Image (cartoon, rainbow, N blue to C red):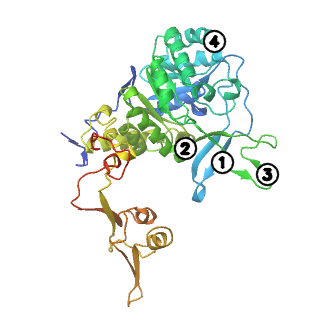
Amino acid sequence: MMATNVSGIIDSTNDVDLSIDFAGIKAPNPFWLASAPPTDKAYNVERAFAAGWGGVVWKTLGEDPPAVNVSSRYSALYGRNRQVMGLNNIELITDRSLELNLREIERVKRNWPDRALIISLMVPCVEEAWRTILPLIEATGADGIELNLGCPHGMPERGMGAAVGQNPDLVEQVARWCKQYYSKPVIVKLTPNITDIRAPARAALRGGADAVSLINTINSITSLDLDRMVAHPIVGGRSTHGGYCGEAVKPIALNMVAEIGRDPATQGLPISGIGGISSWRDAAEFIALGAGSVQVCTAAMLHGFRIVEEMKDGLARWMGEHGYARIGDFSGRALANTTDWKYLDMNYVSIAHIDQDKCIQCGRCHIACEDTSHQAIAHYRLDDGTRRYEVKAADCVGCNLCQITCPVEGCIDMVAVETGRPYMNWTQDPRNPHREVQEPAAAM
């Protein structure tokens, strides 16, 4: 039953529990900061916990001597009004000593026992290196480790990062070493710079990993200085590719999370979703596709740690409105409706419908359809000088380009048309020479 607050407004969040148990790691909410510059020292992490983050993945530790970074390190892809759509970085793992990091981690975990504190880790792909460092990691009292097998720049040149993550045999081997020499949960962070994300996920599971996290950053060059003829960021007149993150990578991340979530070989494997999460809605989408926790980096770097307040409040309100009491109530719920193209209903038809009361006569739908689609939107100039746009149902193929280009939300809807034809997918099509003998189950 929903409670009512002092203002008489129904509060749908009272019965919502945001706490999670992710692969044995408990946290008061699913919002974690990803391993990155915001988590590279105790000062940042304690500020994050004070702001309300449920967990933190400490910036990747490695062997001493620590890595040496360069400057500058970041570049960006901008939208209108200089909104940062994507961030590119060429920063390496921690440039602070292992001893200093371990001491700070131990203190932070002692001060914040209810928060998830995970240590990101990267050492050479040699058993002795893992056997040496893992007891030191365990002594801090941290809740688990995340294996950084995805860093796309700098570290692969040293035989680490994506150089390991792109090789399923090495992924399996490293996971197995970690399970042998470390008693707490092991999360394998996967690189998106690979053809099939399922291969390293399956390898991690074979190696005994308790969970996977994804995606790590994507190989990228965001922009060039055309006067100096060098890409950004510029280091002494030269540059290199870096790791891409931020809002622009979210669609890629969602797909890869879904691929693992619906793969029978990795079914049930806990997933920590990463990639372009900047709002509660983004988080809910990752969770609906199988994530049990979510990690945020770029949004925090752009807007500060306090963004977690709105994320928690928004997610709790949405869950309350939809009757979800716990994260697990809707985690993975969208997977049943995510399938291969060949199982989509070829007999399903929808066409566009324009709400004339909402239409502002801008003509964007007409231009897009007339120039680049199926010439299915008629344009009329009325006697009073106004314009009117109407969909020609016989020509509309239901591509929904008009809906996408329309600047008014809800003005154009896609309306299902009853055809009287039964469900049929590509595998059942009589014209398909590779037609399957048995009819697969239709998507729900």
Q: Nearer the viewer, residue 300 or 25?
A: 25
Q: Is disc 1 surrounded by few (<14), some (14 to 19) or many (20+) residues within 10 Å? A: many
Read off the residue under disc 3: 229
Instruction: Estimate the spatial distance between the alpha carbons at disc 1 and disc 2, rounded to whole Å.
Output: 12 Å
Read off the residue under disc 1: 222
Q: Nearer the viewer, residue 89 or 125?
A: 125
Instruction: Estimate the spatial distance between the alpha carbons at disc 4 and disc 3, rounded to whole Å.
Output: 41 Å
Q: Is disc 2 surrounded by few (<14), some (14 to 19) or many (20+) residues within 10 Å? A: many
Q: Amino acid at mark 4?
A: Ala
Mark 1 or mark 2, whichever is nearer to me = 1
Sequence-first tag of 2 and 3: 3
Mark 2 or mark 3, whichever is nearer to me = 3
Tell me what residue is drawn at x 64 percent, y 14 percent: 99
Sequence-first tag of 3 and 1: 1
Q: Is disc 3 surrounded by few (<14), some (14 to 19) or many (20+) residues within 10 Å? A: few
Q: Is disc 4 surrounded by few (<14), some (14 to 19) or many (20+) residues within 10 Å? A: some
Q: Quadrant of the N terminus?
A: top left
Instruction: Estimate the spatial distance between the alpha carbons at disc 2 and disc 4, rounded to whole Å.
Output: 32 Å
Element at label 1: loop
Q: Nearer the viewer, residue 216 or 247?
A: 216
Q: Is residue 62 left or right of residue 350?
A: right
Read off the residue under disc 2: 246
Instruction: Estimate the spatial distance between the alpha carbons at disc 4 and disc 1, rounded to whole Å.
Output: 35 Å
Instruction: Estimate the spatial distance between the alpha carbons at disc 3 and disc 1, rounded to whole Å.
Output: 14 Å
